[in-house]
Image: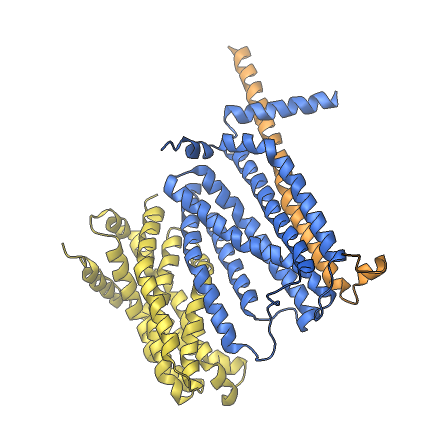
Amino acid sequence: MNWNWFYRMGSPRWFYESTSRWLPWLGILTFVLLAVGLVWGLAFAPQDAKQGNSFRIIYLHVPASFLALAGYFLMATAGAIGLIWKMKLSYMVMKCAAPLGAVLTFLALFTGAVWGKPTWGSYWVWDARVTSMLILLFLYMGVLALQYAFDSKDVGNKASAILALVGTVNIPIIYKSVDWWFTLHQPATISFTEAPSMHPDMFQPLLVMILGFYCFYAVALILSVRVEILNRERKTGWVRNLVKQSTDKSLGAEL
Amino acid sequence: MAYNMGFWAFLRRDLQLINRRRGEVASPLIFFIMAATFVPLGITPDSELLKNIAPGIIWVMALLATLLSADSLFASDYHDGSLEQMIISPQLLVMPVLGKVTAHWLTTGLPLTLASPVLGLLLSLPTAGYLPMMAGLAVGTGCLSLLAALGAALTVSLQKGGLLLTLIVMPLYMPVIIFGSATAQYSIQGLAWGGPLAVLGAMLAIAIALCPLAIASVLRLTTIN
Amino acid sequence: MNFQFDNVSQLLNMAGHGIYVWTAVLVTLALVAWLIINPLLQRRDVFKEIAQEVSREQLRQHANRESV
C-alpha cells in the first residue's frame, strides 16, 4: 500500500501551508459554537432543581475536563508516533499539547472548585473525579518539566514521549484506584457526581459547548504548532519567502 | 543461553557496591523512623486519633524514603561509565536493570518493611494491622522501587535531577499508596485484607513486566547522547 | 425554551449564585482567549525576528560584495 500520504503529513511545510487555508474557518466555527453554547447554557437552559443556577458552570467544567483528558492521550499518541516513525512534526505537536492540556486541567479544577462552593459548601472536596483530575495535572507538569530539562532537544522530546506513554498506561489504573479509594472513604449520604440522566433542555447546550471546546483545542494547538514550525524551520527558503511576502504586504499597506 | 544471564551477577555486584557504602544506605531507614516522629509532634500524640491515620503515615514515610534513595540508583554507574558499558554489551539491558532494582529493593524496601512494626508501635497501630501492613509494604515497595528506577533513568544525565525525579514519579505512586494503606486499614476494620493485597500484587506484576523495558529504552536514550 | 431570567440584573445575580457562575465564566473566557492570542503574538514576534535576520544577512552580503 502506498504510504506516501502518511509521510507527506509529516512535513512541517505541508502542515503549515494546508492549515493556513482552513484555520480561519475553524476559528470562526469555534467562536460561533462557544458563543451559542454559552449564551444558551447561561441564559436559556432551565436551572437545576437541587443546585439552582450554580449548575450552569457545568457548561464550562465538563468540556474542560473532557479536553484535559483527551489532550493527554493526544499528547501521548503524538509522542508514540514520533518515537516509532521519528517524525519531527509529531514531537512538535506533543510539545505544544502539553501546556495546552495543563491549562485546561487547571481550568477544569478551578471551575469545579467554584462550582463546589455554592453546591456542597466548600471549594475543595476530595471526591474521585476531582482527585483524578489533580493527579492528571501532576502528570502534565511532569511531562512539561522533563521536556525543558535536557540540553539536547532531541533527547528531551524522546524522554517526554516515553514519560507520556508511561502516564497513559497509568491513567486507567489511577482512575480506577481513586474511584475505589473514594467509595472506601465516602460519607454515606451525599453523592458528588451529577445525575447520570440530564433533561435534553440542559443536555443540548452542553453538547454544543463540548463541540466548541474540541474546535477551540484544535485551533489553539494548530496555532502553537505553526509557531513552533516557524521557529524550527527559520533558515529554510519557504519560511523566508513567507516572511518576505508578509513584510512586503505590510509595507504596501503602510504606503 | 540462559534467559537470566546477568541478573544474578548484577544483583551480586550491586549488593557488593552498596555494602561498601553501608552508611549511605542506612539514611533512608533512619529518615523513615525519624520522620514518623514528626507526626505526633506536629499533629497530636492522642493514640485514638493516631491509630486511624497510622497506616497512611507509615506509607507516606515509606514513599518519601524510597524517593530519597532513588537518585543513587544509576548515578554512580553513570558517572564512572559502567552504565554505558552495560548498554553496549550484548546481553539484554533489562537484566542489569532488574538486578539493580532488586538490589535497591533489598536495601531500601525490605528494611523499611522490617522496620515498620517499630513505627506501628510509635503511631499506635492496632494489633490487627501489623501483619497486613508488613505484607502490603513488602509487595508495594517493590512497585515503588521499580517506578523510582524509571524516574532515576529519566533524570540520570541531569544536574539537578533529584527534584524532577520526585515530580515525575509522584503521580505514578498514588495508586500504590491507595491500595497499600487500604491493606492495613481493611484488616483494622475487620474486613478481608487479601483484596487490596492482591491488587498490589497485580500492580507489582505489571511493573516487573513493563518497567524494565521502559527503563532500558530510557537509559539507552539519556546515556548514549 | 425561553429566557430564564426576568431582566439583566437577575441574569447577573442568578439567585445569589451569580458571583460563582460569572467568575467561572470570566476566568474560562480569559484563559481561552489567552491560549489563542498567545500563539498569534508569538507568530508575529517570530516573523519580526526572521525579517531582522534576513535584512542583517543582506547587509552583510552587500558589505562583502563592496569590499571585494
Left or right of residue C1, residue A144 in this image: left
Viewer can see residue A244: yes
Count of labels in the image: 0
**Which residue is located at x 59 percent, y 39 percent?**
A223
Considering depth in this image, is A250 or A177 the residue closer to the camera? A177
Tell me the quarter of the picture where residue A168 sits. bottom left
- Locate residue B71, reporting x and y percent: 38, 60
Q: Which chain is rendered orange in the image? A: C
Position of B200 with respect to A68 (left or right) is: left
Residue toward you, C57 or C38: C38
Question: What hue represents chain A?
Answer: blue
Q: Percent x, y for residue B225?
A: 35, 43
Q: Position of residue C58 (x, y in %)?
A: 56, 19
Provide residue B57's location: percent of width, then percent of height.
46, 77
- In front: B117, or A13? A13
* In the image, farthest residue toward the left: B1
Which quadrant is the N terminus of chain C positioned in?
Answer: bottom right
Whether residue B170 is visible? no
**Quarter location, residue A126:** bottom right
Residue A145, compared with residue A47, is above or below; it is: above
Coloration of the structure image: by chain
**Image quadrant assignment for residue A86:** top left
Q: Tell me what residue is drawn at x 51 percent, y 89 percent.
A: B48
* Chain represented in yellow: B
Q: What residue is rendered at 34% in x and 62% in y?
A: B207
Q: Is residue A184 above or below residue A99?
A: below
Position of residue B64 relative to residue B116, above or below, is above
